[in-house]
Image (cartoon, helix red, strand yellow):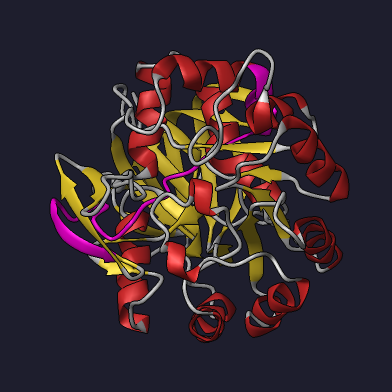
């Protein structure tokens, strides 16, 4: 087979805008260019007329999929979960853990860091145990603890340079010092599962926090006299807000409000997926807690709290365009470019530019996924290519 491929005829979304009837040239594992239709070449050509070609999706908050858990599964389980999300367009994924014993989390960090070193995942996100018992969501309250910088450092060290993000309630004792420690080590400090006031949130941002973990969820709502963390996170240009656009975690009006205030430049669409994503309804474990998934909605068996999602990013993309009415270019920024920038990987992924990894997604006119390419190889082939 030819090492070069031409993806021809699609609407190609570039950082500078959408090119109708464009072409994307793939040479080996890299994008070699995007050129107007009509250029002659002997490379393998795939006719994508009537389709969209967008960058591969980048998920910075994901706990599993395909029946497999990133928190407790074997190496094969993790790879199964990663592959499940690749089938849905996520070509780059950060594996998220949930609250557990410190030694267990350090052990998981070791396993996941090996997969990061191999390029199977982009890094590790620790969600908990340094979160508020008032906003614990689907985390075991018995395992929660205040954010001790020494313990935060233990997780960073266990990840061997592959820790990308840590979610914590910054208002707890040790919270601000932990934020500063994370910033010093190049790890994203994310504010989440928090009961902080507006003023406390502002102090955490000033200390170096840069991400809002699944905005709205697991934090106080907006009050007209006590605006809380949501207002502080939305108004500050230093913060990127995670949004779970599955129709369950957020009312469409809340999603629109956040996207309007943060803008396309400060929004990252995530899944917060758990094992059932791409797998189906049933009973699952999220860390030590039992979860029931019914009609694709995951809730704790005890208490009924939402327990992650069964979302995949292709569904989030389609919903953002067809239900919320966002421009395709804005969704591409939120689902690919922005998370790639947060991870410090935008020179490699996140847009369809020459020299970057050939990670891309093919969508039809209804924004249903039809093809996925990762590093120049089809994970999901859109059709049989014709030699040009």
Quadrant into which the C terminus falls: top left
Percent position (x, y) of residue 1?
A: 36, 66
Q: Is residue 184 visible?
A: yes
Q: Residue at x 42, y 24 (%)?
A: 320
Residue 255 drawn in magenta = no
Relative to 51, say whether 131 is above or below: below
Is 228 placed left or right of 322 in the picture?
Answer: right
Percent position (x, y) of residue 238?
A: 80, 37
Q: Quadrant of residue 200?
A: top right
Relative to 96, say whether 35 is above or below: above
Q: Nearer the viewer, residue 116 or 146?
A: 146
Is 82 placed left or right of 370 in the picture?
Answer: right
Relative to 241, say whether 304 is above or below: below
Q: Residue at x 74, y 59 (%)?
A: 173
Tell me where the magenta segment starts and ends, as one range. 261-285
Q: Nearer the viewer, residue 75 or 53?
A: 75
Residue 270 drawn in magenta = yes
Is 66 placed left or right of 153 in the picture?
Answer: left
Q: Is residue 326 visible?
A: no
Relative to 48, say whether 176 is above or below: below
Q: Nearer the viewer, residue 91 or 270?
A: 270
Percent position (x, y) of residue 8?
A: 43, 35
Percent position (x, y) of residue 88?
A: 33, 48
């Amino acid at each position: 087979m030819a090492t070069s491929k031409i993806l021809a005829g699609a609407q190609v979304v570039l950082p500078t805008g959408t090119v109708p009837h464009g072409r994307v040239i793939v040479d080996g594992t890299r994008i070699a260019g995007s050129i107007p239709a009509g250029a002659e070449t002997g490379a393998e050509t795939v006719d994508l007329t009537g389709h969209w070609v967008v960058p591969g999706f980048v998920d910075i908050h994901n706990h599993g999929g395909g029946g497999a858990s990133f928190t407790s599964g074997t190496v094969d389980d993790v790879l199964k979960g990663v592959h499940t999300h690749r089938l849905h367009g996520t070509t780059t994924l950060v594996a998220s853990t949930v609250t557990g014993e410190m030694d267990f989390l350090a052990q998981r960090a070791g396993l996941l860091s090996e997969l990061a070193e191999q390029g199977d995942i982009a890094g590790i996100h620790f969600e908990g145990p340094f979160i508020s018992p008032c906003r614990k969501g689907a985390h075991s309250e018995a395992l929660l603890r205040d954010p001790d910088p020494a313990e935060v450092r233990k997780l960073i060290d266990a990840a061997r340079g592959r820790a990308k993000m840590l979610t914590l309630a910054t208002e707890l004792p040790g919270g601000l010092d932990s934020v500063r420690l994370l910033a010093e080590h190049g790890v994203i400090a994310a504010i989440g599962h928090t009961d902080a006031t507006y003023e406390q949130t502002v102090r955490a941002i000033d200390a170096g926090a840069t991400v809002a973990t699944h905005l709205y969820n697991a934090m106080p709502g907006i009050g007209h006299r006590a605006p809380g963390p949501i207002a502080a996170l939305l108004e500050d240009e230093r913060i990127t807000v995670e949004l779970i656009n599955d129709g369950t975690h957020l009312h469409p009006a809340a999603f629109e409000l956040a996207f309007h205030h943060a803008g396309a430049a400060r929004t990252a669409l995530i899944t917060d997926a758990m094992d059932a994503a791409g797998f189906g309804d049933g009973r699952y474990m999220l860390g030590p807690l039992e979860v029931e998934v019914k009609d694709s909605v995951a809730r704790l068996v005890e208490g009924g709290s939402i327990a992650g999602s069964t979302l995949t990013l292709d569904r989030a993309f389609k919903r953002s365009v067809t239900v919320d009415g966002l421009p395709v270019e804005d969704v591409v920024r939120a689902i690919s470019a922005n998370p790639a920038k947060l991870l410090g990987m935008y020179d490699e992924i996140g847009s369809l530019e020459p020299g970057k990894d050939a990670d891309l997604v093919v969508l039809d006119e209804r924004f249903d996924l039809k093809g996925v390419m990762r590093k120049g190889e089809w994970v999901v082939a859109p059709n049989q290519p014709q030699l040009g």
